[in-house]
Amino acid sequence: MDNIITGAIAVAMFLAFAGGLAESIGEIPFILIVIIVGAMLCIDFYESAKEGLQQERNKNAGPSA
């Protein structure tokens, strides 16, 4: 669970930084790159969090007898 919290904070910080940078630069190609990279980051975080939660559930369930 700690990994999800720290990962969400890191994703939010990156998106805020890159979004602010894209806004201050204001060039369309850079804005598109930030949007695409941000979307890929969010998708990867979602998949990693889902996989981590599944592994945690399997670990807590223990062996089935």
Image (cartoon, helix red, strand yellow):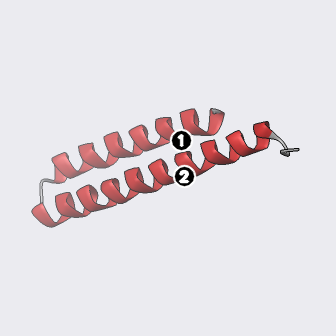
Callout 2 secondary element: helix
Locate residue 44, reporting x and y percent.
46, 56
Q: Which amino acid type is marked by label 1?
A: Gly
Name the quadrant containing residue 59: top right
User: In the depicted view, which residue is nearer to us: 25 or 40?
Assistant: 40
Label 1 packing within 10 angstroms: few (<14), some (14-19), many (20+): some
Q: Is 45 displayed left or right of 35 in the figure?
A: right
Which residue matches tag 2? 48
Question: In the picture, which quadrant includes the C terminus?
Answer: top right
Circle nearer the N terminus (1, 2): 1
Callout 1 secondary element: helix
Q: Is 41 displayed left or right of 33 in the figure?
A: right
Tell me, for residue 34, which label it has, or none: none
Which residue matches tag 1? 7
User: In the depicted view, which residue is nearer to us: 27 or 2?
Assistant: 2
Locate residue 22, reporting x and y percent.
21, 51
Q: Which amino acid type is marked by label 2?
A: Ser
Locate residue 23, reporting x and y percent.
17, 46
Up/down of 33 relative to 3, above or below: below
Q: Is 19 displayed left or right of 8 in the figure?
A: left
Residue at screen point 55% across, 33% down: 5
Q: How far apart in space, not on screen, are marks 1 and 2 (Cα)?
A: 10 Å
Look at the numbered discs 1 and 2 and tell me whether their residues touch, using CB distance below 8 Å: yes
Frontmost of labels 1 and 2 is 2
Up/down of 48 relative to 56, above or below: below
